Amino acid sequence: MQRWLNETWQNYKSLLLFLVLMALFRSAIADWNDVPTGSMNPTIIEGDRILVNKLAYDLRIPFTHVSLFKRGDPLSGDIIIFDSEVSDLRLVKRVIGVPGDVVSMNNNVLSINGQQLSYQSLGGDQIASTVDAVEQLSGQQYTVRTRPGSRVSSFAPLTVPQDYYFVLGDNRDNSADSRYIGFVPRDEVIGRSRSVVLSLDYENYFRPRADRFFKTL
């Protein structure tokens, strides 16, 4: 057995070291995350592989959620990736409220700390009964999709606790977000995404979508 181990190490040490370093890199520095659902439509679509910057907020011990050094905190408008204990899933959502914010929604119109956000309509899809609009939050602009009359289009003011975040999907009426899973603890956040790496069309034999490669979110 010892001889076999020695021979294996001698023959494959370069490959083994590469695999170990790659695993460490993906765990602690950067990785990509597959997005199989439409909860972030139209910003992120099914089949996108998004780049996850795992150093955006923390330097962590590889393969753990233990932070060695805190580099910053999520900001309003950030797209974050987090391991949700409540849903037992890794989720991708947009930060809407940071600690201390008071968040409310009335007919799909958000208000933060009593200030209503600005919206610019982009028209709708009559077949799907959806409406797209540009939402402006903390100097950022992005497109959200809503379905007028949805039962989750309104909620009373909520104050975001310390070390927690309020998140929503950009596809507001098709997203398991803070309206269902509650506030997201800071220590569940594993990184931030600002771009798509590549995208495959699930409904067209996984054909690559060239127009979405390295697309900025």
Image (spheres, rainbow, N blue to C red):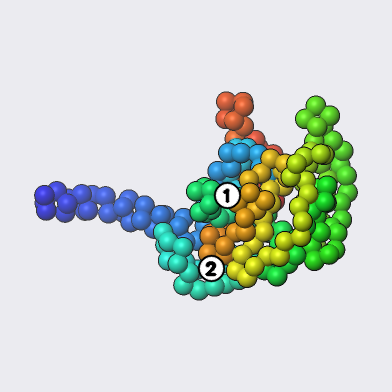
Check disc 2 and give the amino acid type.
Asp
Residue 91 tag number: 1
Count residues near mark 1 (Cα–Cα under 10 Å), then give few for <14, some for 14-19, many for 20+: some
First in residue order: circle 1 vs circle 2: 2
Q: Is residue 128 above or below residue 48?
A: above
Identified at 81% across, 59% down, the residue is 111
Helix, strand or loop at label 1? It is: strand
Residue behind mark 2: 58
Identified at 87% across, 38% down, the residue is 123
Q: CA distance from mark 1 to mark 2?
A: 18 Å
Residue 193 tag number: none
Q: Is residue 97 visible?
A: yes
Count residues near mark 2 (Cα–Cα under 10 Å), then give few for <14, some for 14-19, many for 20+: many
Q: Position of residue 24 (x, y in %)?
A: 41, 59
Q: Is residue 214 visible?
A: no
Q: Is residue 73 left or right of residue 107?
A: left
Viewer-closest of 94 and 202: 94
